[in-house]
Image (cartoon, rainbow, N blue to C red):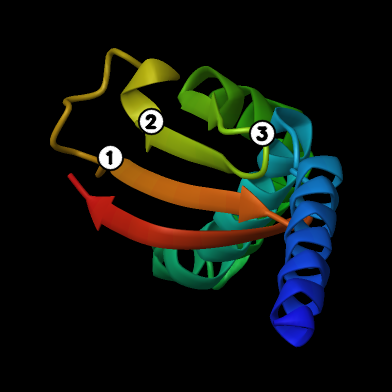
Amino acid sequence: MKGLQVITVVGGIALVGLGVAMTLTNPGQDVYEEYAAQLLTEYLQENICPKAPAILGNSLQGQCRSLVDSSQSEIKQLISQGTQRQNFIVFSLYKTDLSINKVVPFLPSNLLPSYHAETVGALENFYTYQLEKQ
């Protein structure tokens, strides 16, 4: 019976320690915005810029990459405006809706796709478990 009590106490202390560690390392909105901006930048540079028309060689592709690099603050702002955070103390859920039509509303809505992403943040890490094109 004594051994069971020791295991219960040690297990309880470990659970409390894990809860405290998760609470202290629950990433905030600003850290998420950095993470999402990095992912979006990589996606644009690897998937969208190479598809830019090569009217004058690769100059439009290079301009696309330069534009993405120089637009980091705008990308973070777009992510910030489209993200809702649910803070559960030990972890957070982030739901982000990205649409280029929020930036350039005069373009037809079907010209560029919109995206919905859901991400969990815990222990200073992020895991995007849902990403869908809308």
Q: Which residue has dot 3 on it?
A: 89
User: 113 or 89: which is nearer to us?
Assistant: 89
- What amino acid is labelled 2 in the image? Ile
Q: CA distance from mark 3 to mark 2?
A: 32 Å
Q: Measured from the top left, where is residue 125 in percent x and y?
A: 71, 60
- What amino acid is labelled 1 in the image? Ser
Q: Is residue 105 above or below residue 1?
A: above
- What amino acid is labelled 3 in the image? Ile
Q: Which residue has dot 1 on it?
A: 114
Contact between marks 3 and 2 (CB within 8 A): the answer is: no
Contact between marks 1 and 2 (CB within 8 A): the answer is: yes
Q: Measured from the top left, where is residue 1 in percent x and y?
A: 69, 82
- Which label lies toward us, 3 or 1? 3
Tell me if 76 is positioned left or right of 93 in this view: right
Contact between marks 3 and 1 (CB within 8 A): the answer is: no
Q: Residue at x 63, y 34 (%)?
A: 75
Work out whether mark 3 precedes mark 1 in sequence or the reverse, and give the earlier one: 3
Q: CA distance from mark 1 to mark 2?
A: 7 Å
The residue positioned farthest toward the top in the image shown: 106
How packed mark 2 is, by other alpha carbons closer than 10 Å (few <14, some 14-19, many 20 or more), is some
Q: Measured from the top left, where is residue 39 in percent x and y?
A: 60, 58
